[in-house]
Amino acid sequence: MGFYVTNPDPFRHKVRDWLEVNCPESMRQPYRSEADLCWGGRNCKFQNKDQKLWLQRMVSKGWTVPTWPTEYGGGGLDREQTKTLNEEMARIHARPPLESFGISMLGPALLKFGTNELKQQHLPPIARGEIRWAQGYSEPNAGSDLASLQARAEDKGDHYLVNGTKVWTSYGELGDWMFCLVRTDFEAKKHAGISFVLFDMNAPGITIRPIKLISGNSPFTEIFMEDLRVEKNQVVGDINKGWTVAKYLLTHEREMIGGSGLSRAGSIPISKVAVAVLGMENGILSNTMLRTDIAHFEMDEFCLELNTERARDKVKAGVSLGAASSMFKYYGTELNKRRFELLMAINGSDAMVWEGGESRSGYLPKTWLRSKGNSIEGGTSEIQLNIVAKRILRLP
Amino acid sequence: MVLVLNEEQQMLKDAARDFLQERAPVSQLRELRDSSNSEGFSRALWTEMVEMGWSAILIPEKFGGLGYGYTGMGIVLEESGRTLTSSPLLGTATIGVAAIATYGSEEQCVSILPAVVNGRHLLALACDESGQHNPEHVSTQAVETHTGYRINGRKIAVLDGHIADTFIVSVRTGKGISLFLVPVDSSGVSVEQYPLLDTHFAADLRFDQVAVGKDQLLGELNGGLAMLEKILDVGRIGASSEMLGIAQEAFERTMEYLKERKQFGVLIGSFQSLQHRAAHLFGEIEMCKSLVIKALHELDENSGGNAELASLTKAMLCKTAHLATTEAIQMHGGIGMTDEFDIGFFLKRCKILESLYGDHYYHLDRFARLRGY
């Protein structure tokens, strides 16, 4: 420890100084929802000047994707440096400059499975926030049983002709390009006939329909593909080996969704909310039954944070996470659902207001309803438990 | 903060596991119960543990110990949880030593700690007076005399109370609570021992006009409650380490059983209803592993203590180890209910540790209070 006192980490100080000068004041507020974040793309609408400036400055350092190699627009940072950057950003409550499925899902898969040409073509625009990616995985008849997907890609020599329907595509109407699972071998066993392809969503043959959720919002879409042309050089990994890429990408998606159980930097502990709304009696929270559940929740939340930290330590120590991402996804999403159940209970009839009054446009009830999807999207809780049972516990 | 063991700690863990699996397997607990042993533990085994250096882990080097710290102690306790080993590791080497090494005078340390290192002296913390753990509830009293104090009262369910050479006793002293070191052979001390449901022993103590000198006061007069809470937090985290070992061992044995037991012509581990419960339990145990390492690190690095983390750890381990041991019985089915099969021993030992120094409910409440609600 003494080492750090006399010899402060020079990288940390460089980062701290740079952030101090370059992170606009308005970007140092905890974000309330996904809408407060910049998602990039061809039709990106910045909330304000600062948001645009913050993105441009971070892009210039490669810090929208700090771990990616510099040749693809990344920061070329190692894990320790990335951790330092994240810590320094958290210290001043800096918002992430850019959020996207390109960063969190496609990027890692391309880095692992993509050809050099594909990486050169797609990674830099992701890093700069120029292209927004959408995911084409689920189908009306392929949900939990994803590998039974039926979107057909017929071989037409230099290209494929794709026909089929994708569902639960997040923000499909805002997507510029799509990464998509299609069937390229119709005779093979279900896992063995799938390819992972990329295409521009402006191409002819695509129709997009929003799906309205119980929350009243439409964050998901259904995508209809009719005689859609997909170039053969846009296949990631080997033909008919797309399931390998798909699974790898899913572990990243799970970690991302599982992270929803973690309290966001700067967010208020749920017990503080409860005390403010319900008040104290005889030195403890007035609603003693609710108090027990809140204590349970805060303990579980702390444990998940620690376990995430231990997983990071493990990765650093060279131990692979693998199927453990399913455990995080299961635990994190179940925890997030509990968080909103508690918030609903704490706020009582105020939480029932859909519009008007003090309801902040029904933010709480809508977010509560939305949270019910956490344990369904990206593989249901039951699917995650199946994965843990089979891959980790090796049950028959 | 790194939440994985370093190389040295991993070596200690491996050595502890090898020793305990070979020298103190679960079958030894059964032998203790079925023999006429009236102490509930093996003195010969304790001598071997002392030779391994385990009595010295927490004792500073200047008193002949290893000064290896709580993380090392926790590792050994976790492994002894796996084998359900009955020994003075928790009562003497962890709790008793923490009390004396942290708060004892130079003279007290010199007279007791080297003897603990050698395995010749055992300790017990005597704080509870009713069936519900509550360190503030102290009616045992010390009245000042011109040579020191005179103690009257009783303590119940004292862990290792039947074998201790010195008791650390919480006593009301006018303006507050104080801690005293009381040798078992002091005039007026009587010990009534009994076996617990897990085959280990505990004792009720009676203090009848017990005269103690001023040099037997541990730490500050009337400052005992704050010290006691910190000593108890060490005990709670130590018990949590042991419960972590119990939970893992019960879980692993159950997973093995799911892979060998057949019903309806297939392995029962192929049933999804069992798979999901097993996978859920796996996740809960993983959370507890992180938590116990964190709590042990905190004991080593934060001398001010972290009461909130101690309660969180005890509450979570009570919940998870309870789930692991009860699911173990259920998933083993009928054979899990038989005395002949070992899995029931895990349920029993776990229950004792759950109740020790505050159960799940106690620590939920304490955690919430410490967080201000």
Image (spheres, coloured by chain):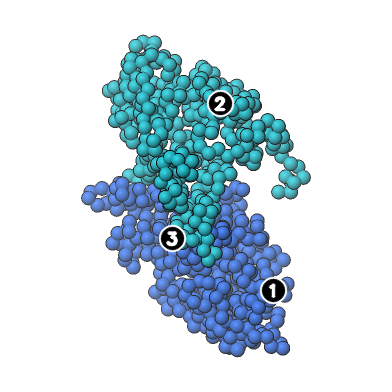
Chain colours: A cyan, B blue
Residue B298 placed where, x, y %?
Answer: 61, 56
Circles 1 and 2: CB distance less than 8 Å? no
Residue A290 placed where, x, y %?
Answer: 45, 57
Q: Is residue A218 left or right of residue B295?
A: left
| Residue lying farthest to the front in this orientation | A357
| Residue lying farthest to the top in this orientation | A157
Please state the chain letter of the residue tagged with numbered disc 1 in the rendered image.
B
**Tag 1 residue:** B220
Discs 3 and 1 lie in a common subunit: no
Residue A314 seen anywhere in this rendered image of the structure: no
Residue at left offset 60%, top offset 47%: B2
Circle 2 packing at 10 Å, graded few (<14), some (14-19), many (20+), is: some
Residue B212 sits in quarter = bottom right
**Tag 2 residue:** A46
Circle 1 packing at 10 Å, graded few (<14), some (14-19), many (20+), is: few
Inter-mark Cα distance, 3 to 1: 39 Å
Query: Is A33 situated above or below B61?
Result: above
**Tag 3 residue:** A289
